[in-house]
Image: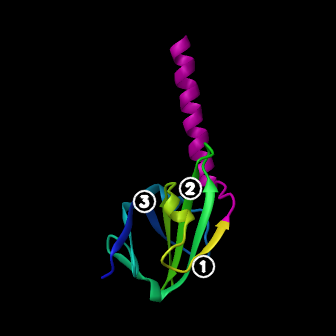
Amino acid sequence: MGKVLERFMVKAIKADGEDFKRSSKWVLARRGRLIVKEDEIQMNKWVFPYSEIDEAVLFKTKTLFLITCYILMIKFKGNIYQFGLNPNKFWEGELPFAVNRQEGKTGYSPFSVIIRVVAAIFILVAIYIDYI
């Protein structure tokens, strides 16, 4: 067991398919502590020894409020795991595992758009009712 390098509060999903993509699974994502060690990454019962990771991609994007955030995607033993990471300089530096870095926009899934529209309607109705 290697030395702990960093710990982060994250949300994570076990994704479908072969590639990084948007998913409604983020609504019910697991929450927990991602522990980055010298020889492995772990979150709860998920343990990823660096020597057994098929591929790791660190996706850098901006939130709706232009805050930088990261999504770490790990392909491991035929499965894909995605971790929503908060901004932290740790992810900008050299990491203890091989990673492909990418930048871009994640966009919004149809589910996410519907939820945002419904929330906006509720807020506007509440404001309107308050002014009557």
The answer to if 5 sits in the magenta stretch is: no
Residue 43 quadrant: bottom left
In the depicted structure, whether residue 26 falls above or below residue 122: below
Q: Residues within 10 Å of mark 3 (few under 14, many from 20)?
A: some
Label 3: which residue? 10
Amino acid type assigned to the residue bearing label 1 in the image = Glu
Q: Is residue 112 left or right of residue 90?
A: right
Alpha carbon separation for disc pair 3 and 1: 22 Å
Which of 110/92 is in front? 92
**Could you give the CA–CA distance between mark 2 and mark 1, rounded to whole angstroms?**
22 Å
The quadrant in which the C terminus is found is top right
Question: SS for tag 3?
Answer: strand
Looking at the rendering, the stretch of residues picked out in magenta corresponds to 103-132
- Quarter in which the N terminus is drawn: bottom left
Residue 84 appearing in the image = yes
Count every numbered label the image shows and give the total: 3
| Whether residue 117 is situated above or below residue 42 in the rendered picture | above
Tell me the amino acid under the disc marked 2. Cys
Q: Please determine whether, in this image, residue 50 is positioned above or below residue 105.
A: below
Would you name the residue on which mark 2 appears? 69
